[in-house]
Amino acid sequence: MRLWTILLASVLSGTALADDRAVDRPDWGAHFAKLGATGTLVIVDERRTPAAALVFDRERSTRRYAPASTFKIPHTLFALDAGVVADEFQVFAWDGVKRSFPGHNQDQTLRSAMRYSTLWVYQGFARQIGESKARAYLRDANYGNTDPSTSRGDYWVDGNLRISAVEQVAFLRSLYRNALPFKVEHQRLVKDLMVRQATSERILRAKTGWEGSYGWWVGWVESQEGAVFFALNVDTPRRLEDLPKREQIVRAVLRSMGALDSE
């Protein structure tokens, strides 16, 4: 409980926090059970004053996992700051190597690389940025355990970088406010790249991630009433069956809260 309270205090901008501000939502378990899914969901609802923190599976919400492709959010900020990409219009030429995801097999821009979660673009960023600079960026952004080391593969999937659902929400809240230690124009660009759905009433910004044995969906919905942040982490033992469950669970919960329009 103490770890949750400490982490939650950071999520809620370091304000004094009573334990009863962290509300367990066991009823959300019905959405997981309906789909046969195991995982955690953290939501911070800023439509309320003070903001309300809600959680399903409190213990798992503080457990750190590899961020997988959700790391494209901070990684894009790193790349922009380091100058390895100029803007959203720069084209990265496809190397001709056929990969399993069709969207990866073409020239890319930042926008398409975020949309298709194009790994090879970000592998190039990582090589150019280097481990030492990546570590400094991670520390400056206070991102998870801030460790970009790896003995094999990409450090955000196969390496040592880890982050919890609670910490994902804390990071997203800082990005939402342009409060990260990066240029405001870069933070605004990344938020624009994250847009998944937009109406005259609401904007949904989000990013998926998949490590192999578990997956993420993180982001927020913003409206005139305020923002509602979320981070879901769920086991994916059956890839094709389980990956769609990430969005299905979060969308169902957000709709039940009136934070997302019914489909």
Image (cartoon, grey):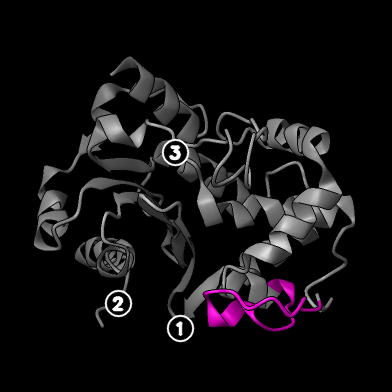
- Can residue 215 be seen here? yes
Q: Is residue 263 magenta?
A: no
In-image side of 24 versus 201 (left or right):
left
**Residue 256 against residue 40 in the figure, above or below:** below
Q: Amino acid at mark 1?
A: Thr
Which stretch appears magenta? 93-110
Figure quadrant of residue 105: bottom right
Residue identified by numbered label 1:
199
In-image side of 4 versus 128 (left or right):
left
In-image side of 220 versus 182 (left or right):
left
Foreground: 131 or 172? Answer: 131
Q: Position of residue 146 (x, y in %)?
A: 63, 31
Foreground: 99 or 47? Answer: 99
**Residue 14 against residue 251 in the figure, above or below:** above
Q: Residues within 10 Å of mark 2 (few under 14, many from 20)?
A: some
SS at mark 1 in the image: loop
Q: Amino acid at mark 3?
A: Tyr
Q: Which mark is residue 261?
A: 2
Residue identified by numbered label 3:
65
Q: CA distance from mark 3 to mark 2?
A: 30 Å
Q: Position of residue 252 (x, y in %)?
A: 22, 66
Proximity of marks 1 and 2: CB atoms separated by less than 8 Å: yes
Foreground: 237 or 227? Answer: 237
Q: Residues within 10 Å of mark 1 (few under 14, many from 20)?
A: few
SS at mark 3 in the image: loop
Q: Identify which residue is drawn at 23% across, 60% down.
A: 253
Figure quadrant of residue 32: bottom left
Figure quadrant of residue 221: bottom left
Farthest top residue?
2
Q: CA distance from mark 1 to mark 2?
A: 10 Å
